[in-house]
Image (spheres, rainbow, N blue to C red):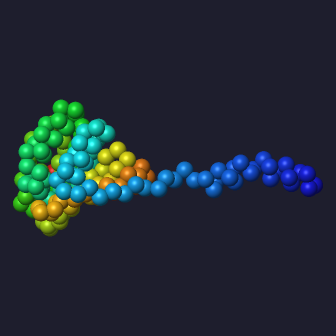
């Protein structure tokens, strides 16, 4: 009886050990400061992904980054990276949404009542990025975590289903 229990325990021991060694990786969290930090995010989108999801777009990118945004958008379209974007309904966000609507590989929708927010949310690859579009000091918080990115993508599609085309 004791030998049988030892054998049973020995047979399940590897499974018990593997439970203790979870495949969950610790998320990597970074702050990227200034215009150069934001450009790093844009370059990473060009390098890492074929689809990019963005919501809560206040339309401040071109104002803060200038011609860098136009160069990025040209390269994004050239690489056929699809953008699904949900804009706010403020004046600047509507203007940015109208510009997005004219771009290749881009789908635009609008959500909710007009409200000002300094932050945009980006989802691409295994990353979630929140960009704070402060004129004097823009910065981004980048979280690298596959599970979080998948969760945010599901949330994005919930918002997408509620948003409307203008």
Residue 166 locus on image (x, y percent):
11, 52
Of all residues shown, which one is farthest toward the right? 1
Left of 28 or right of it: where is 124? left
Residue 21 locus on image (x, y percent):
61, 53
Residue 128 visible in the picture: yes
Residue 100 visible in the picture: no
In front of the other: 86 or 138: 138
Left of 4 or right of it: where is 102? left
In front of the other: 86 or 42: 42
Tell me the residue at 71%/48% (across/down). Answer: 14
Q: Which image quadrant: the N terminus?
A: bottom right
Tell me the residue at 33%/57% (across/down). Answer: 30
Q: Relative to residue 4, is residue 114 depicted above or below?
A: below
Residue 43 locus on image (x, y percent):
23, 42
Tell me the residue at 25%/39% (across/down). Answer: 46
The quadrant in which residue 5 appears is bottom right
Residue 74 locus on image (x, y percent):
13, 37
């Amino acid at each position: 009886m004791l030998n049988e229990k030892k054998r049973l325990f020995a047979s399940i021991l590897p499974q018990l050990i593997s439970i203790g060694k979870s495949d969950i990786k610790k998320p990597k969290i970074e702050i990227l400061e200034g215009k150069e930090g934001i450009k790093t995010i844009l370059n990473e989108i060009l390098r890492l992904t074929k689809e990019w999801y963005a919501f809560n777009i206040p339309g401040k990118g071109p104002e803060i980054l200038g011609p860098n945004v136009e160069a990025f958008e040209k390269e994004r379209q050239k690489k056929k990276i699809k953008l699904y974007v949900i804009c706010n309904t403020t004046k600047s966000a509507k203007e940015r949404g109208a510009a997005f609507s004219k771009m290749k590989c881009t789908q635009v929708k609008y959500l909710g009542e007009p409200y000002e927010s300094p932050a945009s949310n980006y989802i691409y690859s295994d990353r979630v990025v929140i960009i704070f579009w402060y004129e004097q000091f823009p910065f981004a918080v980048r979280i690298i975590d596959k599970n979080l990115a998948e969760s945010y993508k599901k949330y994005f599609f919930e918002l997408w289903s509620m948003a409307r085309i203008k």
